[in-house]
Image: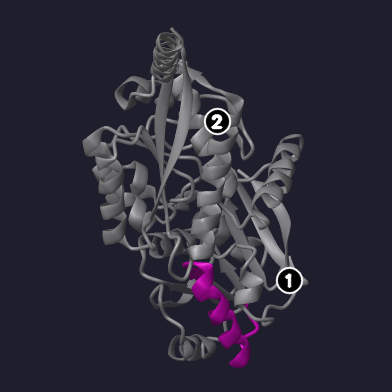
Amino acid sequence: MQVKLNVVVAAAAALLAGSLHAQELVVKIGHVGPTSGPIAHLGKDNENGARMAIDELNAKGVTIGGKKAKFELLAEDDAGDPKQGTAAAQKLVDSKVNGVVGHLNSGTSIPASKVYSDAGIPQISPSATNPKFTRQGFKTTFRVVADDVHLGGTLGKYAVTELKGKTIAVIDDRTAYGQGVADEFEKGVKGAGGSVAKREFTNDKATDFTAILTSIKAAKPDVVFYGGMDAVAGPMIRQMKQLGITAKFMGGDGICSGELPKLAAGAMADGQVVCAEAGGVEGAQKTAMDKFKVDFKKKFNADVQIYAPYVYDATMVMVDAMVKAGSADPKVYLPALAKTSGYKGVTGTISFDEKGDIKNGALTLYTYKGGNREQIAVVR
């Protein structure tokens, strides 16, 4: 009799477990960033932003279409390389992810966006700023930061009107991001009545800039703009000091990290560097961002570099659209994602336009003093 009872109890438990499992919805969110290579510190920062969002969503117990959702993060490394980026994208598509947050670089986000578009999977980049990213006609492509037209143009105008740049030199790393932001900076300079005396280029793996900096030094620049990432900008600032170039050094969000002073190895003078981050909060919104940074440090024992809050918001916006649509099926929740309007995130209010760009995107201008990043202003 006891044996029969045990069998009945076991069967009932199995049925209950099966019923509970049937009520649980597994939602796979893909994340791609360069977690190896020279900007791995930025890639890991991004991935941690996604992990923070996923952990919070699971702790909260989100329901989608009447089912409790269990979120899984599928993280891939693209090393900042376009070919590896498309391979990572295809891997996520094959894994049947419900959505993707990434990639970090424009150079990987743009080719990967076609892979996601072909599969009908929504992609939100937290940091790709090249205008082309959202101008390919793909309905699946979104970003939560302002693009290079805004970022580069604002910095170009600032170089002329605020820094009083008379002789301006521009260097870029020939990537989609670096060249794109440098082109927009040059347009901003010209639009403000200034001119670019020198335009040089390097690559995103270079370590020796003696030749191009010697050429630039001859022009006696008062402003040098670099389109690229902090891993190259740091050594470039060191070599500028060695060559006696005391010009202001400017750059976009790619150089505007907490690591830049370390990468420059003490060569930065206070106030010498002026950079802009795509995004920015002020007033009451600053409280949410400050709390995020404290919580992030507590969870990962690391300071936010640049983009982690944007990855966090991108993940939350994606899930918010799933909840509104009552489904995690990409084709069902995609229209709700496209209609995102007035979402209150830690990075500010998020609304998408018809291209998938953030509306009224902010920029934050920074400088560095005593090895610490200091905010100059938030501009729109």
Question: Which numbered disc covers residue 144?
Answer: none
Mark 1 surroundings: few (<14), some (14-19) or many (≥20) residues within 10 A: some
Please state if 173 lies on the left or on the right of 234 as rendered. Answer: left
Q: Secondary structure at mark 1?
A: loop
Name the residue at 64% across, 37% down: 346
Q: Residue furthest left?
A: 118
Question: Is residue 340 among what the camera can see?
Answer: no
Instruction: Indicate whether 251 appears above or below 140.
Output: below
Q: Quadrant of the N terminus?
A: top left
Instruction: Indicate whether 155 appears above or below 9.
Output: below
Residue identified by numbered label 2: 58
Q: Which residues are magenta?
A: 226-248
Residue identified by numbered label 1: 371
Q: Secondary structure at mark 2?
A: helix
Queried whether the magenta region covers residue 168, the answer comes back as no
Q: Which one is nearer the viewer's eye here, 161 or 343? A: 343
Name the residue at 54% across, 81% down: 236
Q: Which of the 4 image quadrants contains residue 155?
A: bottom right
Residue 187 location, x and y as percent? 45, 60
Q: Amino acid at mark 1?
A: Gly
Question: Is residue 370 among what the camera can see?
Answer: yes
Residue 49 location, x and y as percent? 56, 46
Q: How many marks?
A: 2
Queried whether the magenta region covers residue 240, the answer comes back as yes
CA gap between label 2 and label 1 equals 37 Å
Please state if 222 lies on the left or on the right of 33 as rendered. Answer: right
The mark nearer the N terminus, 2 or 1, is 2
